[in-house]
């Protein structure tokens, strides 16, 4: 099985920011233009698609790099200290 690049969300930060913005998961899904299940997945810290990551970043008004870490198979390009 081949390893692949993965976008890993900081689920706790996404959930906290969403709640502080007064949005439920359905509200955020609509604002981000993604399915409700994608919000659940992100808040659980599971890998998401680029479309989902960008939508969540825009919906919350936060930088991609503050909410997500890109993990590559060889470890190159990882941001330290972010949701791993």
Image (cartoon, rainbow, N blue to C red):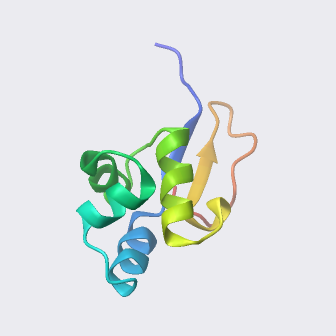
Residue 34 position, x and y percent, is 38, 46
The answer to which quarter of the image holds residue 50 is: top right
Residue at 46% across / 46% down in the picture? 52
Residue 62 position, x and y percent, is 60, 71
Whether residue 44 sits left or right of residue 70 in the image: it is: left
The answer to which quarter of the image holds residue 7 is: top right
Residue 59 position, x and y percent, is 49, 65
Residue at 52% across / 15% down in the picture? 2
Residue at 50% across / 70% down in the picture? 60
Whether residue 32 sits left or right of residue 27 in the image: it is: right
Q: Is residue 52 above or below residue 58?
A: above
Residue at 35% across / 72% down in the picture? 15
Whether residue 77 sits left or right of residue 53 in the image: it is: right
Q: Is residue 64 above or below residue 66?
A: above
In this orientation, which residue lies closer to the viewer: 63 or 77? 63
- Of all residues, the one furthest to the top in this rendering is 1
- Of all residues, the one furthest to the right in this rendering is 77
Instruction: Give the total number of marks visible in the rendering.
Output: 0
In this orientation, which residue lies closer to the viewer: 39 or 8? 39
Residue 54 position, x and y percent, is 56, 51
């Amino acid at each position: 099985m081949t390893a692949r690049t993965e976008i890993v969300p900081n689920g706790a930060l996404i959930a906290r920011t969403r709640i502080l913005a007064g949005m439920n998961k359905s509200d955020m899904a609509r604002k981000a233009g993604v399915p409700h299940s994608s919000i659940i997945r992100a808040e659980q810290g599971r890998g998401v698609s680029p479309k989902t990551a960008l939508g969540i970043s825009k919906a919350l008004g936060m930088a991609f790099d503050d909410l997500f870490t890109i993990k590559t198979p060889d470890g190159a390009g990882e941001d330290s200290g972010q949701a791993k």
